[in-house]
Image (tube, rainbow, N blue to C red):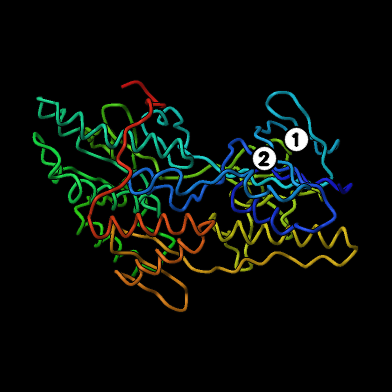
């Protein structure tokens, strides 16, 4: 074991990339996460919408480092950091000393001051969120099949997604295909093709981070799938009975929140400046201000690009940051010069709209339609961990494409957010 102790909090894309890139360095590493698995978050919505099983997009963190004796993995939650004493505190009261600390603690949903909406409008950040949404989605159809009151039945068959970023658009497209293609022959008392899928966006267009032409294509593709796209409309209230969009109340029993994110409380732990989403405003080397031994990466960090815009909170950005911090640590321990400021290299933006349409913006080339969908699928399969899971996901997608049957439509666990 080496003397220099690197503590990494968070087993997401950034944290794992950092630990991988420190292989062979003269350090011992402690990796801490609140969950025992690494989650491939870009495909989380496919678990929520019954396309994939949880085991196809999540893997035990310990399994990655079974042959790395210098890496200790802990299932625990960090609640505070004492930067002066170089020590962090876990939820159970235990403390862990560090020489270098890397916080990659991610983000959760942001309800813009209305946290009371969360029980009825869950977001999508964890496997628990995905299975909760999947359960509500499937139960809505089951309860509608039993319901004799037309008004209640219509509310059960109305699904509202708040926020038209990539997650919201992808959810809306798949839910529409589920209702209008997969389920119609399986129910006798309801016509699932008449289900309403409403996508609400407070901004002027869907997928605002994409080129306007691609955004317009996505809007048309959603409407072709039967999704009601409402732009320039803000949700003003959420309840178990429905949502209020502007001044209009819409009865709906299934609401999914995809409108915003809020970083973990890392800035509060460290007592350093944060932006409006509570992300730590880091320096050019991804360090917390005034704390040279603490790095912040991923969704926890507000990283400014050369053009004055923020680095997006996506997996490739987190991986690049993790790789960069590993280089900085290696340089410091070897007495070599630091690698220079962090520079983010954007590899493109991707979003899918249903089963056979997607948009891709590589900057130098823009794709849309079924060609983009195939490129999107190949890209995601490539970034999955391990041949077994690449094959499993590819097979699931092929089966769904050919049969139009979703493979993970099981209601297996109790409701975790509210009582039925």
Q: Residues within 10 Å of mark 2 (few under 14, many from 20)?
A: many
Element type where label 2 sits in the image: helix
Q: Could you say which is closer to the camera, residue 22 or residue 403?
A: 403
- Residue 150 lies, in percent from the top left, at 10, 29
Outermost residue to the bottom = 364
Outermost residue to the top = 419
Q: According to the image, label 2 marks what residue?
A: 266
Spatial CA distance of label 1 from label 2 is 8 Å
Q: Is residue 232 left or right of residue 196?
A: right
- Residue 292 lies, in percent from the top left, at 82, 51
- Residue 396 lies, in percent from the top left, at 35, 54
- Residue 102 lies, in percent from the top left, at 72, 47
Q: Could you say which is closer to the camera, residue 117 or residue 6?
A: 6
Q: Is residue 206 above or below residue 338?
A: above
Q: Could you say which is closer to the camera, residue 354 or residue 396?
A: 396
Q: Which mark is residue 31?
A: none
Q: Could you say which is closer to the camera, residue 416 or residue 59?
A: 59
Q: Residue at x 29, y 69 (%)?
A: 370
Element type where label 1 sits in the image: strand
> Residue 252 sits in which quadrant?
top left
Q: Is residue 151 left or right of residue 202?
A: left
> Residue 225 sits in which quadrant?
bottom left
Q: According to the image, label 1 marks what residue?
A: 81
Among numbered discs 1 and 2, the one appearing first in the sequence? 1
Q: Is residue 192 above or below residue 377?
A: above
Q: Residue at x 73, y 38 (%)?
A: 271
Q: Is residue 291 above or below residue 417?
A: below
């Amino acid at each position: 074991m080496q003397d220099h102790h690197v503590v990494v909090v968070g087993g997401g894309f950034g944290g794992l990339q950092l630990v991988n890139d420190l292989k062979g360095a003269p350090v011992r590493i402690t990796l801490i996460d609140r969950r025992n698995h690494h989650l491939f978050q870009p495909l989380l919505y496919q678990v929520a919408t019954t396309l994939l099983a949880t085991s196809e997009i999540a893997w035990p963190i310990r399994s990655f480092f079974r042959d790395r004796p210098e890496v200790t993995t802990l299932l625990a939650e960090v609640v505070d950091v004492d930067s002066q004493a170089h020590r962090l505190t876990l939820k159970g009261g235990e403390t862990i000393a560090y020489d270098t600390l890397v916080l990659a603690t991610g983000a959760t949903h942001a309800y813009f001051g209305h946290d009371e909406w969360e029980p009825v409008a869950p977001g999508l950040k964890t496997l628990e969120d995905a299975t909760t949404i999947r359960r509500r989605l499937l139960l809505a159809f089951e309860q509608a099949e039993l319901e004799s009151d037309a008004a209640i039945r219509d509310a059960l068959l109305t699904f509202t997604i708040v926020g038209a970023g990539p997650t919201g658009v992808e959810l809306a497209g798949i839910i529409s295909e589920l209702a209008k293609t997969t389920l119609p022959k399986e129910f006798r008392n309801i016509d699932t093709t008449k289900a309403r899928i409403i996508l609400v966006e407070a901004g002027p267009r869907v997928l605002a981070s994409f080129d306007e032409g691609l955004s317009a294509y996505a809007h048309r593709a959603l409407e072709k799938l039967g999704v009601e796209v409402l732009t320039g409309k803000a949700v003003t209230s959420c309840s178990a009975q429905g949502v209020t969009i502007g001044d209009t109340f819409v009865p709906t029993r299934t609401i999914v929140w995809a409108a915003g994110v809020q970083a973990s409380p890392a800035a509060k732990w460290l007592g350093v400046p944060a932006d409006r989403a509570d992300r730590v405003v880091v320096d050019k080397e991804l360090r917390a201000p005034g704390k040279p031994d603490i790095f912040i990466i991923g969704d926890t960090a507000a990283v400014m690009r050369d053009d004055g815009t923020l680095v997006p909170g996506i997996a490739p950005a987190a991986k690049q940051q993790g790789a960069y911090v590993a280089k900085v640590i290696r340089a410091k321990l070897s007495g070599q010069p630091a690698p220079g400021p962090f520079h983010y290299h954007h590899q493109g933006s991707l979003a899918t709209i249903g089963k056979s349409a997607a948009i891709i913006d590589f900057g130098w080339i823009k794709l849309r339609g079924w060609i983009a969908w195939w490129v999107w699928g190949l890209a995601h399969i490539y970034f999955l961990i391990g041949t077994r899971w690449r094959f499993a996901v590819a097979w699931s997608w092929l089966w769904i494409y050919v049969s139009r049957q979703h493979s993970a439509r099981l209601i297996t666990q109790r409701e975790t957010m509210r009582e039925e």
